[in-house]
Image (tube, grey):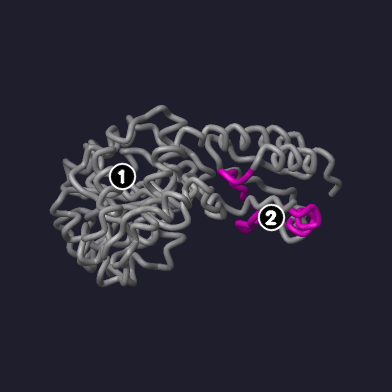
Amino acid sequence: MEINLISDTVTKPCSNMLDLMINCEVGDDVFKEDPTVNKLENMIAEMFGMESSLFFPSGTMANQTAIKIHTEPGDQLICDKYAHVYNYEGGGVSFNSGVSCKLIDGDRGMFTSKQVLESINPPDFYHSPKTSLVCVENTTNKGGGSCWDINELIKIKEICKQNDLNYHLDGARLWNAMVKTNTDPKDYGKIFDSISVCLSKGLGCPVGSLLIGSKEFINKAIRIRKVLGGGMRQSGFLAACGIYALQNNINRLKNDHLRAKEIESILIKSSFIRKVEKVETNILIFQLNQDISDEYFLKKMSEHNVKLISMGDNKLRLVTHKDYSQEMHENFLNILSNLSI
C-alpha cells in the first residue's frame, strides 16, 4: 500500500465525480458557450457574494492574472516572505507584470495591518516603486496550513482603502480555512477586491481554479487569461468536477484536519524530530534533528512505501487529503510510532 502525502493535489476523481463529468453538457468556453463552466462560475460568484468569476486551468494563472490587473509595470506588491505568489509561481510577478515584491517577515505566512502600513512606500517618493497591491494567502502553504484571523484581514482592508491599494486573496486552500475557522465565503467576498480559489487540492478535482471579482475585473481577466494561454474549449468536463466537489467535498475537510493533528501528536513525541510546526488544517511541517538529513529520512519513509516532500534545511512537509484513507492513516501512525532512526 502506497501512502502518498506529498500534497493534496495527488487525489483522483471518485466514481460519482466521474459520472457527473461524463454526463455533463459542454460547449466552447472560449466563446463563453459552455453551460457547465457558466454554471460553475455563477455558483462560485454567488457563493462569495461577488459579481462574477472565471474558470482557470491553475491557481498560479489565476493569481498572476489578478496581479496583472491590479498593478502596472514598475509597481510593487506587499506579501509575506512565505507567500505562494513569491516563492512558487516561477517568478511570474516580475515576468508577467514587471512588478517587485516587498516581503513582510510575518508569523507562519501571516502579517498584521501595522506591518502592511509600515511596508507602503511613500506615493510621492519617485525613487521607490509605487505600492499598489497587498496579497494574502489563506491557508498559508509554507506556513504549515495556518489560518488567518478574519478580523486582521478586515484591518488590512482598511489600510488598503486608506492608501488606495488593491487587495487580493490567494485562497488556494481557503476551503480548509473556512472549515477550521467556521467562516463563510461571503465573509471574504466582502473584504477582498479579488479572490482565487483552487478545486484541485482539498476538494479533489483533477484540474481547475477560479478567479472571483467584479464584472469589470473579470472582463479584464478574460483578456489576460487569453494572453497567458488559459482559454479552454469543452472545459465543462472539468467544471463538472468542480460542481460536484463544491456540493460534496467541503465539509469532509475536517477529516483531513483531524488526521493531521493525530500525526502531529506522534511526531511531537518522536526522538528524531527537532520541531513540529503548529497544525491547524491539513498541512504538517516538521524539522528533523540536525544529525539526520532529510534525504536519509525520505529514504527510510520510502522503504515503508511512504512519500513525503522536503522543504530544505531538514524540514519536511506532509499533506493529508481525500484519498488518504483511514487504513492508510492507521498504517502510517504505526510506521511513525515504531520508526527506528
Compared across the picture, whether 255 is left or right of 212 comes to: right
Q: Is residue 104 in sight in this rendering?
A: no
Query: Given the current orientation, which residue lies at the most extreme front position?
Result: 23
In depth, the one of 338 and 108 nearer the eye is 338
Residue 311 lies within the magenta run? yes
In depth, the one of 198 and 279 nearer the eye is 198
Q: Which residue is mark 2?
A: 307
Residue range (magenta): 298-324
- Residue 326 percent coordinates (x, y): 67, 37
- Residue 2 percent coordinates (x, y): 72, 53
Q: Secondary structure at mark 2?
A: strand
Q: Amino acid at mark 1?
A: Val
- Residue 97 percent coordinates (x, y): 27, 68
User: Can you tell which quarter of the image residue 33 is in?
Assistant: bottom left
Q: Which residue is mark 1?
A: 116
Compared across the picture, whether 30 is left or right of 297 comes to: left
Query: Which residue occupies 33% across, 50% down?
Result: 196
User: Can you tell which quarter of the image residue 50 is in?
Assistant: top left
Query: Which residue occupies 39% across, 57% down?
Result: 238
Compared across the picture, whether 152 is left or right of 338 comes to: left
Q: Amino acid at mark 2?
A: Lys
| Label 1 packing within 10 angstroms: few (<14), some (14-19), many (20+) | many
Q: Secondary structure at mark 1?
A: helix
